Image (cartoon, helix red, strand yellow):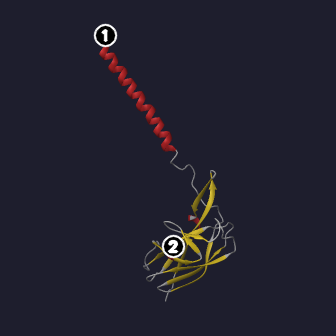
Amino acid sequence: MIKNKRGVSIIIGYVLLISFVLVISVVVYQWMKTYVPRDDIDCPDGVSLFVEDYSCSTTQLNITLKNNGKFNIGGFFIYLTDSPDQKLATIDISQNITLGGDKMAPSGVKIYGADNSMRPNVAEQFQFNLSGTFYSMEILPIRWDEINKRKRLVVCQNAKIREDLNCN
């Protein structure tokens, strides 16, 4: 049995401190949990783009993309390779667009019109300024979808296309 008042107040102080730390940790955990996405944000099955035609030189790339899927598309990311042995395209040329769409910050091309304006079975032409020789391109379609009453940009990883370039 503790007869010293100072000992009792120290124990009460430790109990309050531990209780305070536990309450703060529960509040912080609940707050941090809101930053972790619950479900993957994916494009619906049936989103698809097709490179109908292209022409290129060391200064310009002209491509015709056709939406051959079931859903409208709002834009795309476009990357090139500058080596024939390179498997993953890493050079972003979306900021060099001169025809067919608007630049998105920091990357990507938004097709002219409202969100998801490229309808199925429609072909659009795009033009990009280049500097150098490139060997292949990768294009990832994007859409704006409403998720939890908020409009979100969705990258369609499952609809990525790769095209080898012959720019002689």
Q: Label 1 vs label 2: CA separation?
A: 77 Å
Find disc 1 in the rendering and name its residue.
3
Helix, strand or loop for disc 2: helix
| The label number, if any, that marks residue 94 in the structure image | 2
| Type of amino acid under label 2 | Ser
For residue 112, which quarter of the picture?
Answer: bottom right
Identify the residue shown where x is 40% and y is 25%.
16
Measured from the top left, where is residue 8 in percent x and y?
Answer: 34, 16
| The label number, if any, that marks residue 130 in the structure image | none
| Type of amino acid under label 1 | Lys
**Is disc 1 surrounded by few (<14), some (14 to 19) or many (20+) residues within 10 Å?**
few
Q: Earlier in the sequence, mark 1 or mark 2?
A: 1
As drawn, 127 above or below 40 = below
Q: Is residue 89 left or right of residue 113?
A: left
Measured from the top left, where is residue 78 in percent x and y?
Answer: 52, 72
**Is disc 2 surrounded by few (<14), some (14 to 19) or many (20+) residues within 10 Å?**
many
Measured from the top left, where is residue 80 in percent x and y?
Answer: 48, 76
Q: Quadrant of the N terminus?
A: top left
- How many marks on residues? 2
Q: Is residue 123 left or right of residue 36?
A: right
Q: Marks 1 and 2: which is nearer the front? A: 2
Helix, strand or loop for disc 1: loop
As drawn, 5 above or below 116 = above
Measured from the top left, where is residue 43 in percent x and y?
Answer: 61, 61
Label 1 close to label 2 by CB (< 8 Å): no
For residue 25, which quarter of the picture?
Answer: top left
Q: Residue furthest bottom?
A: 168
Q: Is residue 25 left or right of residue 154?
A: left
Identify the residue shown where x is 67% and y is 73%.
68
Identify the residue shown where x is 56% and y is 49%.
38
